[in-house]
Image (spheres, rainbow, N blue to C red):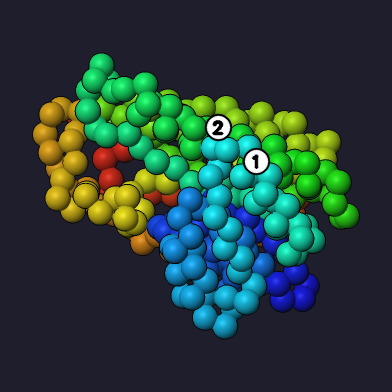
């Protein structure tokens, strides 16, 4: 395979796991389109890529808006001709306040990005993947440990991540006839901007506040590269990558 033959689209590609994954895919021969609401972080990803940055396209995108998502995939096709991988990575949480104090707007802002955005991107990826030659491709959804077990005061985030699991299963099933594979990576405590507060301690179910271990986000990026590199007749449906000592497995 010649270098930069495959094309990947990564939402939330300007920071954290999205950024690390974009750089890892570039290093493994992909052309990469990074999408996000703010253009400056996307351009920072391109600059950090160095000489490989010529194979990276930043596209400012609001994934909760269907027209913006359509533009993202149209620009991807215009630039690279096809899409081989979609990494539905973008996500956000609501303030960690009691469930009964959340506003409708706070709830909907999380649903619009974490769930609706992932669906809209999946839909556009399907439309392109099923008609391109050769047809097919792979979609990887960024789930979370919260897709299995919640943190206190996390109803919007936890509910959407459980919903993403359902989207993953339905996408995997519906994609078979088009040679589209879909899997999910559930991530626990990768060291990113989102988890920086963990060094100061985070609330636990028993009411205590406790520091939690984190792991290098590059470990997640390498796992995505592995999933992406499989042939389309093989799929990692679910993978959990987590800081080994984080409080998830077991009780108490």
Q: Name which residue lies at 26% across and 40% down.
A: 247
Q: Position of residue 117 (x, y in %)?
A: 55, 38
Furthest residue toward left: 208
Furthest residue toward front: 67
Q: Quadrant of the N terminus?
A: bottom right
Q: Position of residue 123 (x, y in %)?
A: 69, 37
Q: Which residue is mark 2?
A: 116
Evaluate whether residue 122 shows in this view: no
Which of labels 2 and 1 is toward the front? 1
Q: Quadrant of residue 118?
A: top right
Compared across the picture, whether 186 is left or right of 177 comes to left
Q: Name which residue lies at 49% across and 37% down.
A: 113
Q: Quadrant of the C terminus?
A: top left
Instruction: Identify the mark nearer the N-term, 2 or 1.
Output: 1
Q: Name which residue lies at 22% across and 28% down.
A: 97
Query: Is 55 placed above or below 197 here?
Result: below
CA separation in Å, label 2 and label 1: 13 Å
Q: Quadrant of residue 3?
A: bottom right
Query: Is 120 placed above or below 243 here?
Result: above
Furthest residue toward top: 100
Residue density around tag 2, few if under 14, some if 14–19, many if 20 or more, within 10 Å? many
Circle 2 sits in a helix, a strand or a loop, which is it? helix
Evaluate whether residue 80 shows in this view: yes
Q: Which residue is mark 1?
A: 67
Q: Name which residue lies at 75% across and 37% down.
A: 175
The label on residue 10 is: none
Circle 1 sits in a helix, a strand or a loop, which is it? helix
Foreground residue among 70 and 193: 70
Compared across the picture, whether 166 is left or right of 18 comes to right
């Amino acid at each position: 395979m010649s270098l930069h033959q495959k094309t990947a689209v990564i939402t939330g590609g300007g920071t954290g796991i999205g950024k690390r994954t974009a750089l890892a895919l570039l290093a493994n021969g992909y052309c990469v389109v990074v999408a996000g609401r703010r253009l400056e972080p996307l351009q920072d990803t391109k600059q950090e890529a160095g000489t490989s940055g010529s194979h990276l396209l930043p596209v400012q995108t609001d994934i909760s808006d269907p027209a913006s998502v359509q533009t993202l995939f149209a620009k991807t096709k215009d630039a690279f001709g096809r899409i081989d991988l979609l990494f539905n990575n973008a996500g956000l949480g609501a303030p960690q306040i009691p469930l009964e104090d959340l506003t409708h707007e706070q709830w909907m802002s999380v649903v619009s990005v974490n769930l609706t955005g992932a669906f809209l991107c999946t839909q556009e990826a399907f439309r392109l993947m099923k008609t391109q030659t050769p047809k097919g491709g792979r979609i990887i959804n960024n789930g979370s440990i919260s897709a299995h077990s919640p943190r206190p005061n996390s109803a919007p985030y936890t509910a959407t991540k459980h919903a993403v699991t359902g989207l993953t299963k339905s996408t995997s099933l519906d994609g078979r006839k088009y040679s589209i594979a879909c899997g999910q990576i559930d991530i626990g405590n990768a060291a990113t901007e989102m988890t920086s507060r963990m060094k100061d301690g985070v609330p636990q179910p028993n009411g205590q506040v406790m520091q939690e271990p984190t792991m290098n986000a590059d470990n997640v990026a390498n796992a995505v590269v592995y999933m992406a590199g499989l042939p389309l007749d093989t799929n990692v449906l679910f993978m959990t990558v987590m800081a080994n000592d984080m409080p998830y497995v077991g009780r108490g």
